[in-house]
Amino acid sequence: MLYTKKEREKIEKVREVFADYIRKSRYVDLLWSEKLGYILLRIDAERRDIVMEPVIMEDGETLCKELCLEIIQDVLEYTGNDHDRESIDALEKAEIKKRLRPYEERLPEYRIRIEALI
């Protein structure tokens, strides 16, 4: 068994909350493997390539964190700034908080973890 029932339910809840984001994103996809479980891929859809090492999801918290980091990266790309999240300015921070708020509201059990990423 890849996950306990409780672990699988937590991952499924996060997957459901982020389903629309995953479907619309040009940069991430979440796949199911009978051998490994859920795998997050970071992709370049235009080149049809996997651009980073796939991440095997161990739990819902990890999936939530990885997807929130993708949203943060989306904001940095949107603002045209070429820096990491440690260097975000006030406007970027406000936009990140705005984009993450719906996920925080639906996943209150991860709220502290999400806020720690900003």
Image (spheres, rainbow, N blue to C red):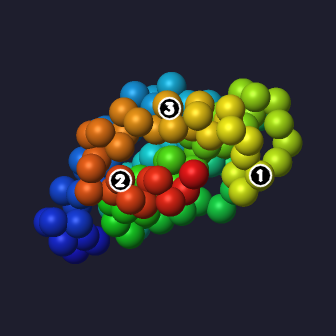
Q: Amino acid at mark 1?
A: Ser
Question: What's the CA distance linking mark 1 and mark 2?
Answer: 22 Å
Q: Which of the image's four quarters has the N terminus?
A: bottom left
Q: Mark 3 or mark 2: name the one nearer the start of the chain.
A: 3
Q: Disc 3 versus disc 2: distance between alpha carbons?
A: 14 Å
Q: Amino acid at mark 3?
A: Arg
* Residue with the mark numbered 1: 87
Q: Is residue 62 left or right of residue 106?
A: right
**Which residue bears the numbered disc 2?**
111
Residue at x 76% of width, y 28% of height: 79
Which residue appears at 77% of the width and 52% of the height? 87
Q: Earlier in the sequence, mark 1 or mark 2?
A: 1
Does label 1 or label 3 sit earlier along the sequence? 1
Which of labels 1 and 3 is toward the front?
Answer: 1
Q: Residues within 10 Å of mark 3 (few under 14, many from 20)?
A: some
Nearer the observer, 32 or 102: 102
What is the secondary structure assignment of the residue under circle 2? helix
Q: Residues within 10 Å of mark 1 (few under 14, many from 20)?
A: few
Asked if residue 41 shows in the view, the reply is no
* Image quadrant where residue 5 sits: bottom left
Q: Residue 36: where, in percent of width, then height?
A: 40, 67
Identify the residue under disc 3: 99
